[in-house]
Image (tube, grey):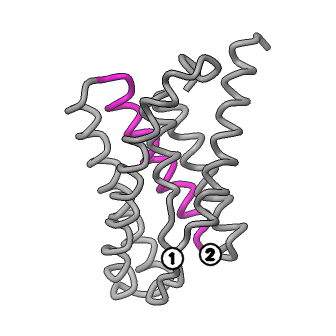
Amino acid sequence: MNNQRIKKMTTLSLLIAFNIALSYIVKIPVPATNGFVNLVEAGIFLAALGGGARSGLIVGGASGLLLDLLAGYPQWMIFSLVIHGLEGWLVGLIGAKKGYWQQAIALLIGALVMIVGYVLAGAVLYNWAAGVASIPGNIAQNVMGVIVVLILLPIVKRLPIVNGII
């Protein structure tokens, strides 16, 4: 295994751990869906825009699954793996290392995938009313994620250890 690949795996692992810790600390329960609003999108968007589709997929899927497991919501784990993984992959595929407007479109598409995904997951786990009830919280979660990534991405890109890895 070459040095660059080890650095990338380490960086993504640290980003997953940071994302889970940040999301676990900042979480707002949503009783209607037996879920919560958090900052998981920030790490997913950061990995996807900085490192591409594969990084977004890995950080999104792993962060979503592990966060649900550690936060006591195991019924959501597989849904989160798929939804956040797909979200990260699409954001990275469309917006990684691209211009402002392409990144904005990528974030919007990623947010829509996440919102629709959790409406469907809520309907499967509970009922359609619970799925629809998740929409405002998921919109807020995506807006918070976009704000955090807009602040962090320029800073993270300047770090020599991270530049070119994510």
The segment highlighted magenta reads: 76-98
The disc labelled 2 sits on which kind of residue?
Gln
Q: Quadrant of residue 136?
A: bottom left
Q: Quadrant of residue 121?
A: bottom left
Is residue 84 shown left or right of residue 94? right
**Crowding at label 2, few (<14), some or many (≥20) Cα neighbours within 10 Å?**
some
**Crowding at label 1, few (<14), some or many (≥20) Cα neighbours within 10 Å?**
some
Is residue 67 shown left or right of residue 157? right
Q: Quadrant of residue 160?
A: top right
**Residue 93 among magenta residues:** yes
Which of 49 and 163 lies nearest the eye of the viewer?
A: 163
Q: Which mark is residue 75?
A: 2
Q: Residue at x 38, y 39 (%)?
A: 91
x and y, in percent, of residue 14 in the image: 70, 39
x and y, in percent, of residue 113 in the image: 34, 55
Name the quadrant of the C terminus: top right
